[in-house]
Image (tube, helix red, strand yellow):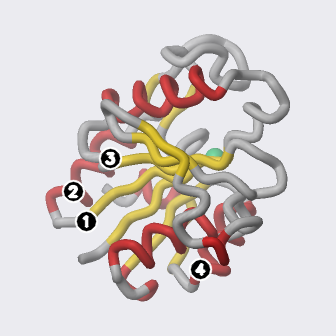
Amino acid sequence: MEILFLDLDGTVRKPKSASKFITSFADQKPIPGALEAIADYASRGYFIVGITNQAGVEAKHKSQESCIAEQQHTLKLFPQIHSILFCPDFAGNECWRCYRDKAWDCSGKYPNLIGTYRKPGSGMVQHIIISNEVYPEDCFMVGDRPEDEGCANAAGVEFLWANQWLKAV
Ligand SMILES: [Mg+2]
């Protein structure tokens, strides 16, 4: 199995409103080209997982519930994204996994990853690599910020900048 890790904000989704950040769970739309790029990778058999820092939860810009609703809305917009991992805290101690109909705290599944979940830490990526028993060489990650590149490097996963990835399809 090959895995494509996707940063979300600024890589595949952006606010529908004029705001810099998503203001409510449904305030989001695909970045032009993202649906096509994802469909292309899905058609080539990639398992696709979203990886997003969401310390806005700890900062109280959004509630845990609305953060989960936001990820589930993204899963509706992008049918080929299998699931989304998010880290709601600045210390990188927590990791939540969202599916279309459920979400749960998976922070403690691999205790040695606690403290590394927030990007540029690689905990969220490692979590998926370990649980799917894949090699980092068979994965890559797309993102728009240095912390995404740092996360990919820390996990031993090849990194691609979002603007190049979107143009390549
Ligand atoms: Mg981003």
**Label 3 to label 1: alpha-carbon separation:** 10 Å
**Label 2 to label 1: alpha-carbon separation:** 5 Å
Which residue is identified by label 4? 155
Q: Nearer the viewer, residue 38 or 67?
A: 67
Q: Secondary structure at mark 1?
A: loop
First-in-chain label (4 vs 3): 3
Amino acid under label 3? Ile
Please identify the quadrant where the N terminus is shown: bottom left
Please identify the quadrant where the C terminus is shown: bottom left
Q: Secondary structure at mark 4?
A: helix
**Label 4 to label 1: alpha-carbon separation:** 18 Å
The yes-or-no answer for disc 4 within 8 Å of ligand 1 is no
Residue 7 seen: no
Residue 38: where, in percent of width, then height? 31, 50
Q: Nearer the viewer, residue 71 or 64?
A: 64
Q: Residues within 10 Å of mark 2 (few under 14, many from 20)?
A: some
First-in-chain label (4 vs 1): 1
Which residue is identified by label 1? 46
Mark 4 and 1 residues: CB-CB less than 8 Å, in contact? no
Mark 2 and 1 residues: CB-CB less than 8 Å, in contact? yes
Label at residue 81: 3
Quarter of the image for residue 5 reads bottom left
Q: Residues within 10 Å of mark 4 (few under 14, many from 20)?
A: many
Residue 82: where, in percent of width, then height? 30, 49
Q: Residue at x 68, y 40 (%)?
A: 54
- On screen, residue 54 versus residue 34, left or right, reads right
